[in-house]
């Protein structure tokens, strides 16, 4: 399924509704395709360890977010939920004014309910606006977006910045299992407040700088940062990945009252089992309310984050729909931009201010995060 305007083209898989490839600035001589597509997509289909891996690419909405390895109250969910690996149905397409929307739907069975996905493009914007509405799926559940970016091979080539966060923590459980020929580099369960100073597992080794990625070739690591609330930062929570050589910034915007954290999945040729085979290089910047990628069981009981006062599950009501609004986009940057320092929000506009003092503005209807309307 494809949704397009003059500026943006979005492809969405039927299985799992994974969003990629997405082409921004498609009307220019230098279009941008920022999302990762797993390297086995052009190979002969083979059995996968999890349904999510069949189409793994770009961004997709997860519920319950995480591995879901254990049964919970008689429910056994696949990794990231059945919605990431089962077929979605086309509900409709429409254009109203300058907004074009593709609507998809899926009925869940493990825990009964329905998810309706609306992907919208606005003429003149290099932005994708998404709204996932959950109905009938009652109880507490971790959920979120799984935006996954393509990465260059050169270490430190991409610069990462985020809005203010309370603290970060490396995954306290084993994320990459050497028994599965997977390897991780960061110190498990470490708590910190600076992305440039994240402890590694080796005694005496310097801290990792996670504002410069990819890093630590041959390893796959997971961290989570807990965003400050909208009221404290006077605007949406945001994450930005700057690609200086390619001349653009990819960004995401969210309401931290709905998605209170960001999980970083840093996969730099660190997994050698099937289907990875040591070839996967990507960066997941996954906006969630969850306990790392541990799934429903861990996220709905006491865990390392709840002990810090952080909610790791969203309470859903069968009688009241829950909507998750999310924004992703790309903005061009000039030479010498450096990294993103901060964002300024004006009506229907976002300005990206760099560490070198440069300013770039783009049309973005960020009010959508609160209203769900364009």
Image (tube, rainbow, N blue to C red):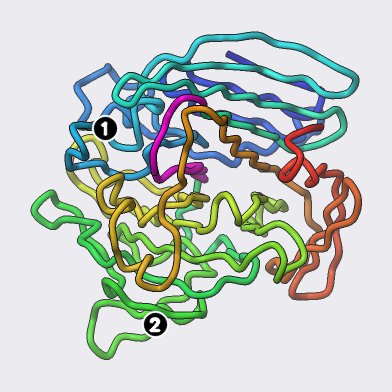
Q: Identify the magenta region.
A: 135-149
Q: Residue at x 77, y 37 (%)?
A: 126
Residue that badge 1 annotates: 77
Question: In this view, which residue lies farthest toward the bottom?
Answer: 204
Residue that badge 2 annotates: 207
Q: Residue at x 87, y 50 (%)?
A: 349
Q: Position of residue 46 (x, y in %)?
A: 21, 20
In the displayed structure, 78 sits above or below 246; it is above
Q: Is residue 148 left or right of residue 7?
A: left
Q: Name which of mark 1 and mark 2 comes first in the sequence.
A: 1
Residue 248 falls within the magenta-colored stretch = no
Q: CA distance from mark 1 to mark 2?
A: 36 Å
Which mark, by number, is residue 230? none
Q: Residue at x 26, y 40 (%)?
A: 276
Q: Nearer the viewer, mark 1 or mark 2?
A: 1
Q: Quadrant of the C terminus?
A: top right
Secondary structure beneath disc 2? loop
Q: Residue at x 69, y 34 (%)?
A: 128
Q: How many marks?
A: 2
In the displayed structure, 5 sits above or below 349; it is above
């Amino acid at each position: 399924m494809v949704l397009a305007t003059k500026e943006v083209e979005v492809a969405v898989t039927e299985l799992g509704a994974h969003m990629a490839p997405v082409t921004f600035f498609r009307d220019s001589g230098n279009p941008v395709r920022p999302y990762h597509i797993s390297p086995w997509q052009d190979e002969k289909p083979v059995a996968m360890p999890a349904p999510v891996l069949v189409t793994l690419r770009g961004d997709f909405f997860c519920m319950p977010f995480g591995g879901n390895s254990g049964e919970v109250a008689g429910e056994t969910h696949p990794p990231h939920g059945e919605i990431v690996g089962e077929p979605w149905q086309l509900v409709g397409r429409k254009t109203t004014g300058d907004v074009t929307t593709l609507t998809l739907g899926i009925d869940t069975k493990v825990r009964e309910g329905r998810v309706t996905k609306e992907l919208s493009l606005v003429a003149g914007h290099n932005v994708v606006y998404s709204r996932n509405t959950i109905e009938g799926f009652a109880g507490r559940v971790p959920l979120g977006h799984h935006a996954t970016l393509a990465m260059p091979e050169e270490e430190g080539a991409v610069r990462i910045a985020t809005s203010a966060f309370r603290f970060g923590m490396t995954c306290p459980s084993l994320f990459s299992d050497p028994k599965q020929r997977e390897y991780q580099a960061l110190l498990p369960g470490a708590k910190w407040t600076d992305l440039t100073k994240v402890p590694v597992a080796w005694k005496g080794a310097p801290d990792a700088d996670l504002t410069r990625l990819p890093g630590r070739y041959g390893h796959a690591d997971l961290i989570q940062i807990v965003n400050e609330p909208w009221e404290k930062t006077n605007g949406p929570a945001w994450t930005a990945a700057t690609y200086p050589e390619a001349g653009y910034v990819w960004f995401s915007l969210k309401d931290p009252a709905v998605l209170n954290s960001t999980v970083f999945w840093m996969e730099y040729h660190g997994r050698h089992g099937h289907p990875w085979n040591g070839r996967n290089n990507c960066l997941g910047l996954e906006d969630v309310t969850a306990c790392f990628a541990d799934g429903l069981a861990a996220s709905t009981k006491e865990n390392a984050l709840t002990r810090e006062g952080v909610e790791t599950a969203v309470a859903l009501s069968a009688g009241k729909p829950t909507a998750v609004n999310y924004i992703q986009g790309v903005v061009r940057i000039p030479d010498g931009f450096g990294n993103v320092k901060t964002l300024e929000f004006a009506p229907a506009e976002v300005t990206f201010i760099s560490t070198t003092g440069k300013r770039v503005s783009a049309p973005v209807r960020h009010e959508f995060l609160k209203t769900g309307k364009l």
